[in-house]
Image: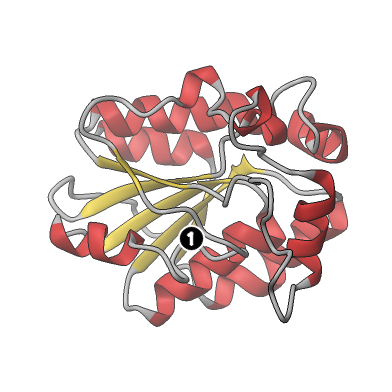
Amino acid sequence: MKRLSYDPNNTGLVVVDPYNDFISEGGKIWPRIKEVAEANNCVPHMQQVLTAARAAKLRVFFAMHHRYREGDYENWKFVAPIQRAAWHRRSFECGTWGGEFRAEFVPAAGEIVASEHWCSSGFANTDLDLQLKRLGIERIIVIGLVAHTCIEATVRFAAELGYDVTVVRDAVADYSDEMMHAALEINMPNYASAIVTTSDLVEALAA
């Protein structure tokens, strides 16, 4: 593997969907993700990456899924299956604990929360690209949930927009080992320039 190096002047960390519903005990979706997330220490690794990025003075961006609000989707002509599931589960419901940032991932002053994405990509129909470009960000490091949906969709879209992308393989999780394998070993290598471990990334950021 080539030596990792990240310039804080043009590199940003993108944290995807660190909601309680996803990554906290008692969250609506946590039971589906728990086994894989605990096997690779996803949440502690996400915390390590965020801490290292802040210490290295990288800009931090949060790409958050749309939080359910009463009336969502009801008058839409077409609702994608993934959106229908969120609708029925009332995922990340606005005004509830499940729809809040897990405490360790609450944005610090000056960190940017992009407008919420309605489906999977953190870029589609949001201002994430604008926010990155305004700050001169050309390379992004991506962590969060879920590997084969929001992470993969965000990575693909980032590549389409011309960003250089790094994915931290043990700071993401999925519903099964098979889904993780498909996302990290088959699909994302076509779009991410580097797929690295937390320890490798933290070492690079500290250099």
How has the structure been colored for display? secondary structure
Q: Position of residue 167 (x, y in %)?
A: 50, 54
Q: Looking at the image, which residue is at 56% across and 24% down? A: 102
Q: How many marks?
A: 1
Answer left or right for 159 relative to 56: right
Give the vertical position of 166 relative to 168 (above or below): below
Q: Looking at the image, which residue is at 45% across and 40% down? A: 200
In the picture of the structure, the residue carrying the numbered disc 1 is 122
Answer left or right for 97 relative to 106: right
| Quadrant the C terminus occupies | top left
Which of 14/141 is in front? 14
Which of 186/59 is in front? 59
Q: Residues within 10 Å of mark 1 (few under 14, many from 20)?
A: many
Q: Position of residue 53 (x, y in %)?
A: 32, 34
Residue 41 seen from this side:
no
Q: Looking at the image, which residue is at 42% across and 76% down? A: 159
Q: Quadrant of residue 111?
A: top left
Q: Quadrant of residue 205?
A: top left
Residue 126 seen from this side:
yes
Q: Quadrant of residue 119?
A: bottom right
Q: Position of residue 32 (x, y in %)?
A: 86, 40
Q: Secondary structure at mark 1?
A: loop
Which of 103/72 is in front? 72
Q: Looking at the image, which residue is at 66% across and 39% down? A: 92
Q: Position of residue 42 (x, y in %)?
A: 65, 33
What's the amino acid at mark 1?
Gly
Answer left or right for 74 relative to 109: right
